[in-house]
């Protein structure tokens, strides 16, 4: 978005034209410090290094930064509700529903005014977990970001018998959503019209007795990058040919991989909770291979995922379910 800046009313001063032009350019230089290919950050000043949020037992798993609203969306594994956080640490409930047993990954589809929420039940929310939903629930809830109304709730677990845990979400350029299942070797697809299907199912995506598929992002070249938590595998899944997926070759251990953030076409950030690190990896051959390009140590805070804010990346520190706070921290490599 372009800005205009006039240091004085032009009609009141009969200065030469070249002086007026120079003044306008100087003003633009002040308000437009720089732009990236991905985001116009001129309207959002540098964010704080750390935001500590005094919310007890919320244990957020997902986070997305809302540029338009100058706020972070956060989920809650232990309470289900969705909230927002501003830079002054204010937490505000955004939406809630009795079907939101545990909210996990989030995806802010800003151009379509949608917040997509992965909903599961691993027993963390004792007030809403039931025998019918425990390790069975995998759903996608879709909210209007303007007013917080629920526009759709899609139960994905009914597509296949077995244990389920909807974890993370990616959205492609057409508005199709892709949701990972950590307890089944499945990636679901939900169209903009709400039609759900199994996009990919393969034994190689299984986590065995532990968590399998976790973080997922859409690459603008037409494929998904998907991480598997139990062994750190990273997969490249073509949108037009999902069964032709391949494993990205890398010497960097990504065991415990959770949330992902595609910084640019060649750079991916991977949050590993078990390694207490955000790894930056890069690829120069379309994600056939990847190599280490830096890391950010979080400390013993069980980081879960990461979101873009302008040219920065913010990591979510959920702490523990009994903690009276959680934090959102700028990653520095």
Image (spheres, rainbow, N blue to C red):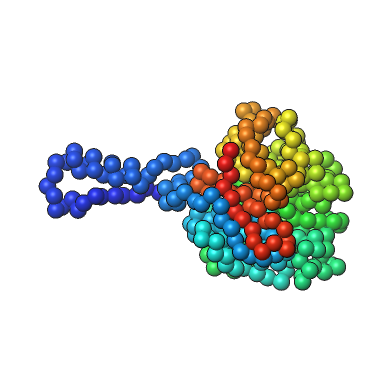
The residue positioned farthest toward the left in the image shown: 14
Q: Is residue 290 above or below residue 80?
A: above
**Along the viewing direction, whichever of 46 and 100 lies nearer the viewer:** 46
Q: Is residue 286 above or below residue 303?
A: above
| Drawn side of residue 64 relative to residue 161, left or right | left
**Along the viewing direction, whichever of 262 and 60 lies nearer the viewer:** 60
Q: Where is residue 207 in the image (x, y as percent from the top left)?
A: 83, 46
Instruction: Say which residue appears at 80% left-offset and 44% top-offset.
Output: 230
Q: How many marks?
A: 0
**Along the viewing direction, whichever of 52 and 166 lies nearer the viewer:** 52
The quadrant of the picture occupied by the C terminus is top right
| Drawn side of residue 24 relative to residue 232, left or right | left
| Drawn side of residue 193 relative to residue 99, left or right | left
Q: Position of residue 190 (x, y in %)?
A: 69, 54
Residue 191 can be seen, yes or no: no
Residue 233 can be seen, yes or no: yes
Instruction: Say which residue appears at 26% left-offset and 44% top-offset.
Output: 24
Instruction: Say which residue appears at 82% left-offset and 69% top-offset.
Output: 130
Q: Quadrant of residue 242?
A: top right
Instruction: Say which residue appears at 77% left-offset and 52% top-offset.
Output: 181
Q: Where is residue 160 in the image (x, y as percent from the top left)?
A: 83, 55
Q: Position of residue 67 (x, y in %)?
A: 50, 54
């Amino acid at each position: 978005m372009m800005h205009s800046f006039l240091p004085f009313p032009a009609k009141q001063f009969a200065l030469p034209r070249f002086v007026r032009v120079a003044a306008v350019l100087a003003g633009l230089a002040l308000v437009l410090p720089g732009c990236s290919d991905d985001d116009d950050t001129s309207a959002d000043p540098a964010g704080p290094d750390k935001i500590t949020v005094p919310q007890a037992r919320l244990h957020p798993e997902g986070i997305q930064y809302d540029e338009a609203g100058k706020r972070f969306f956060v989920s809650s594994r232990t309470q289900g509700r969705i909230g927002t956080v501003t830079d002054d640490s204010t937490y505000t409930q955004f939406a809630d529903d009795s079907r939101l047993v545990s909210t996990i990954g989030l995806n802010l589809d800003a151009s379509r005014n949608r917040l997509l929420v992965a909903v599961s039940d691993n027993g963390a929310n004792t007030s809403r977990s039931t025998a019918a939903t425990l390790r069975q629930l995998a759903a996608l809830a879709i909210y209007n970001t303007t007013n917080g109304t629920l526009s759709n709730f899609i139960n994905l677990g009914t597509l296949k018998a077995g244990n389920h845990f909807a974890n993370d979400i990616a959205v492609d350029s057409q508005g199709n959503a892709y949701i990972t299942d950590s307890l089944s070797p499945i990636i679901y697809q939900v169209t903009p019209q709400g039609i759900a299907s199994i996009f990919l199912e393969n034994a190689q995506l299984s986590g065995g007795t532990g968590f399998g598929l976790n973080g997922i992002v859409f690459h603008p070249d037409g494929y998904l990058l998907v991480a598997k938590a139990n062994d750190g595998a990273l997969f490249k899944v073509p949108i037009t040919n999902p069964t032709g997926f391949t494993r990205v070759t890398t010497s960097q251990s990504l065991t415990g991989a959770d949330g992902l953030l595609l910084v640019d076409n060649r750079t991916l950030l991977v949050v590993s909770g078990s390694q207490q690190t955000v790894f930056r990896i890069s690829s120069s051959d379309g994600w056939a291979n990847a190599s280490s390009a830096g890391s950010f140590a979080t400390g013993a805070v069980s980081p879960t995922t990461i979101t873009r804010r302008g040219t920065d990346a913010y990591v979510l520190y959920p702490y523990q379910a009994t903690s009276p706070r959680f934090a959102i921290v700028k990653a520095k490599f």
